[in-house]
Image (cartoon, grey):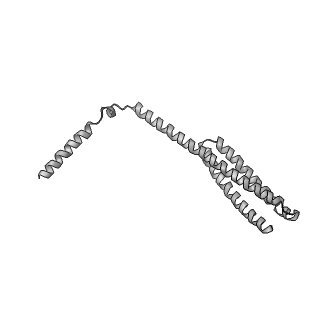
C-alpha cells in the first residue's frame, strides 16, 4: 500500500510540474506559428533546389562521359574501311544524335522549374539507358570488325 501511495504522489507531482510548463510556450501566437511554418517551407524549398542543382550537375557529368565515349567510338569508326563504315554509318549518326539530345535535356534541366525537373529526369534516364545500350552494342560490333 505504501508503494502505491508513494507512486501516486510521485505521479501527481510529476503531472503538476509538467503541466505548469514554460510561460513562453503559453505566449505562442498564430503569427509565431505562421512564421515558423514559413521558415520551414523556405528551408525545404532551398534543400529541394540544392538537390535539383546537384541533379543537374550529376547529369552534366553523365553527358560528358557519354560524349567522350561517343567520340572514342566515332574515332574507331573513322578508322574502319569504307564498306564497314557504310554498314555502321546510320548507327553512329543515331548515337551522336541521342548524345546531342542528352546535352540539350541537361541544359533544360539546369533552367527548369521543380515540376519540369522531375519530368526531365525521367526523360534523361530514358535517354541515358538507350545511349548506354547503343554504345555497348556498337562497341561490341566494332570489336568484332577489327
* Numbered label tally: 0
Inspect this view and state whether residue 95 appears: no
- Horizontally, residue 111 falls left or right of residue 2, namely right
Q: Quadrant of residue 114?
A: top right
Q: Quadrant of residue 24?
A: top left
Q: Residue at x 37, y 31 (%)?
A: 29
Q: Is residue 113 visible?
A: yes
Vertical arrangement, residue 97 with respect to residue 20, above or below: below
Q: For this view, does 84 lie left or right of residue 137?
A: right
Q: Quadrant of the C terminus?
A: bottom right
As displayed, is residue 132 above or below residue 121? below
* Residue at the far right in the pictured view: 82
User: Residue 102 vs residue 49: left or right?
Assistant: right
Point out the residue furthest to the left here. Answer: 1
Provide residue 9's location: percent of width, then percent of height.
16, 45
Name the residue located 87 percent from the left edge and 63 percent from the top edge. Answer: 81
Left or right of residue 20: residue 91 = right
Quarter of the rendering containing residue 75: bottom right
Name the residue nearer the viewer: 21 or 65. 65
Identified at 73% across, 53% down, the residue is 68
Where residue 130 appears, x then y in whole percent?
A: 69, 58
Q: Position of residue 110 (x, y in %)?
A: 65, 43
Amino acid at each position: 500500500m505504501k508503494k502505491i501511495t508513494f507512486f501516486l504522489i510521485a505521479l501527481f507531482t510529476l503531472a503538476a510540474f509538467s503541466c505548469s510548463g514554460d510561460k513562453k510556450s503559453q505566449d505562442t501566437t498564430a503569427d509565431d506559428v505562421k512564421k515558423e511554418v514559413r521558415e520551414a517551407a523556405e528551408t525545404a524549398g532551398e534543400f529541394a533546389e540544392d538537390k535539383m542543382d546537384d541533379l543537374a550537375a550529376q547529369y552534366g557529368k553523365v553527358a560528358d562521359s557519354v560524349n567522350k565515349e561517343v567520340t572514342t567510338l566515332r574515332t574507331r569508326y573513322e578508322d574502319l574501311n569504307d564498306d564497314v563504315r557504310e554498314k555502321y554509318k546510320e548507327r553512329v549518326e543515331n548515337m551522336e544524335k541521342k548524345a546531342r539530345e542528352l546535352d540539350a535535356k541537361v541544359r533544360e534541366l539546369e533552367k527548369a522549374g521543380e515540376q519540369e525537373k522531375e519530368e526531365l529526369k525521367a526523360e534523361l534516364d530514358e535517354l541515358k539507358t538507350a545511349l548506354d545500350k547503343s554504345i555497348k552494342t556498337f562497341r561490341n560490333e566494332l570489336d568484332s570488325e577489327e
